[in-house]
Amino acid sequence: MAASETGLRRLSLICIPTVLQDQGVAFYEALGFEKRTDTPYGNGDRWIEMYLPGEPTGIALAPPPPHDRTVTPMVTGITLTTADIDATHAALRERKVDVDHEVMRPGDPVPPLFFFRDPSGHTLMVVQQAP
């Protein structure tokens, strides 16, 4: 079944469970994200959406389900791009972000990349865009 036949239109958010939401917001804002949504709901929960400026796809820093308020760090699958992998790696290290020790350079067709972790321990990847 083709995507157009399902009614699906676009990827809008990737939700990652976050207990310490204010800490998560501060972390992503320090990376250059902007908070577009911060709405209370339920019993004291908040729905928070973070986006890179001008981008339509964001990250939701949502509380874990009510039946289990713990968060197990996970590999999110979120991939961010940069024009200069070395400069971005250095900038994140300067900001004391938990980044891999060095940039990986697997070779064609895989671009240079590295991983970093957010305050919840979730892993995200940064890859260098082709020129």
Image: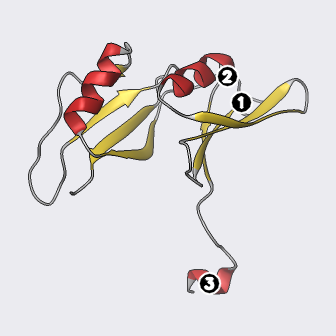
Q: Where 56 sits versus 87, above or below?
A: below
Mark with earlier residue (2, 1): 2
84 vs 14, nearest the viewer: 84
- Give the image quarter of residue 93: top left
Residue 3 visible at all:
yes
Q: Where 17 sits versus 97, above or below?
A: below
Mark with earlier residue (2, 3): 3
x then y, percent, for residue 8: 66, 73
Q: Secondary structure at mark 3?
A: helix
Give the residue number, with chain letter if any, for mark 3: 4
x then y, percent, for residue 29: 56, 26
Give the residue number, with chain letter if any, for mark 2: 21
Mark with earlier residue (3, 1): 3
Q: Amino acid at mark 1?
A: Pro
Q: Are marks 2 and 1 in contact (CB under 8 Å)?
A: yes
Q: Residue at x 18, y 44 (%)?
A: 112
x then y, percent, for residue 78: 44, 45
Q: Amino acid at mark 3?
A: Ser
Q: Which mark is residue 63?
A: 1
Q: Where 96 sits versus 89, above or below?
A: above
Cα separation, mark 3 vs mark 1, equals: 31 Å
Q: Nearer the viewer, mark 2 or mark 1?
A: 2
25 vs 62, nearest the viewer: 25
Quadrant where the C terminus lies? bottom left
